[in-house]
Amino acid sequence: MNKPKIKFTLLTGFLGSGKTTFLNTLLEQQKGKVNFVIENEFGSTSIDNALVKKNYNQLFELNNGCICCSLDTELIAVLEQMIMAENLPENLYIEASGVADAGMLASIFKREDIMKFFDLQSIIVIVDAENFEERVTEIPEITRQLVAADYIIINKEDMVQSSYISMIKRHISEINPFAKITSSKFGVIEKGFFDSTKNINEFNRLDFESRESKNGHGMKSIAIEVVNPFDKDKLYAALTVTMFLHYNQIYRIKGFAKIEGSDDIILVQSTGNKVSLTKHEYLEGEDPQPVLVFIGRNIERQGLERILRNLYSTVKY
Ligand SMILES: Nc1nc2c(ncn2[C@@H]2O[C@H](COP(=O)(O)OP(=O)(O)OP(=O)(O)O)[C@@H](O)[C@H]2O)c(=O)[nH]1
């Protein structure tokens, strides 16, 4: 008997725009269905696997590169493994790295051997309202993601004025007039947004693939183990200053750190030039390791280590 095709959804959006946050809201609504997730992090160390709440049946991780180019063979191996399994999922959600080109990814799924088993539902792109206008001019990957999108969610609407959201919407419509666009706070969108499939953007997707080259995006990720606890205020200040001074170089910091005088593990996140340090709520069986991952262009390990070392002479790497 022929197995039904696995419906899959591609989720992209620049680093820190809110992909994992949105995926969590989506999986929450999908409880009861058999959902598989593929997480692709640009960094060598996965942080997202601890951040995706466990509303999925199986999670595959592909780290240290981007599945649209450097990890495409690994992606195909995971898909083949999935097809061979006795119990197929109903849905597959792929959270691509923040620099992934969705058009390129979609082309992997157009291979005849893959298309027999997988059915692309839609490409969803998350946009960070706070820094979209600055980033879109300097980072070509953002435009590529938008061009390939069927649905675009302008996230973090709580961080900007509503007139600014309208302006971003207009700008995005010029880049991709075919996509359906909405805005959200923490990835929560209005009911029925995905109901219509009219917008499926096949034309743009095809057009875009033909212009793409595999260049690895020129991005680099550096993971630094931070075994010893930090003074929370000093860590916050140092990372904030670093993000401020290197806004055009460092696009994302995330990871876990220990804090002096506390058994808590702190989740470290940065987007734009803002840093947040929040207590990490453990999921069952989780054991997050203290490590900070920096993602950007022209970043060097030595300089980053120096910043952390200055906080503590005792920090071990
Ligand atoms: N204020 C605000 N913060 C948000 C919103 N959505 C997400 N965040 C925060 O933004 C940060 C990044 O969110 P993630 O969901 O991890 O972003 P991501 O796109 O998965 O990040 P990468 O996987 O590193 O590319 C986290 O600190 C979130 O809590 C929002 O709507 N408003």
Image (cartoon, grey):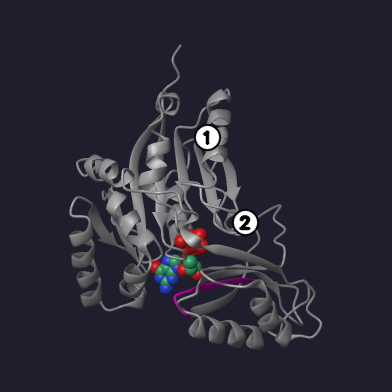
Say what secondary structure mark 1 lies in: helix
Mark 1 lies within 8 Å of ligand 1 (Cβ measured): no
Main secondary structure type of the part rendered in magenta: strand
In the image, is 261 to the left or to the right of 66?
A: right
Q: Which mark is residue 40?
A: none
Nearest the eye: 234 or 218: 218
Q: Which mark is residue 76?
A: 1
How much space separates mark 2 and mark 1, taking CA atoms? 20 Å
Disc nearest the viewer among 2 and 1? 1
Which stretch appears magenta? 266-273
* Image quarter of residue 154: bottom left
Q: At 52% across and 34% down in the image, what residue appears?
A: 76
In the image, is 305 to the left or to the right of 178?
A: right
At label 1, which amino acid type do we have?
Answer: Ile
Based on the picture, tell me whether residue 269 belongs to the magenta stretch: yes
| Residue for badge 2 | 46
- Against 287, residue 122 (above or below) is above
10 Å crowding of disc 2: few (<14), some (14-19), many (20+): many
Location of residue 212 in the rendering, given as x and y in whole percent from the top left corner: 36, 48
Q: At 36% across and 62% down in the image, what residue appears?
A: 140
Nearest the eye: 310 or 214: 214
Q: At 49% across and 32% down in the image, what residue appears?
A: 89
| Res 57 seen here | no
10 Å crowding of disc 1: few (<14), some (14-19), many (20+): some
Nearest the eye: 197 or 40: 40
How many numbered marks appear?
Answer: 2
Name the quarter where the C terminus is drawn: bottom right
Location of residue 282 in the rendering, given as x and y in whole percent from the top left corner: 66, 61
Are discs 2 and 1 less than 8 Å apart at CB?
A: no
| Res 270 seen here | yes
Residue extending farthest top: 1
Say what secondary structure mark 2 lies in: loop
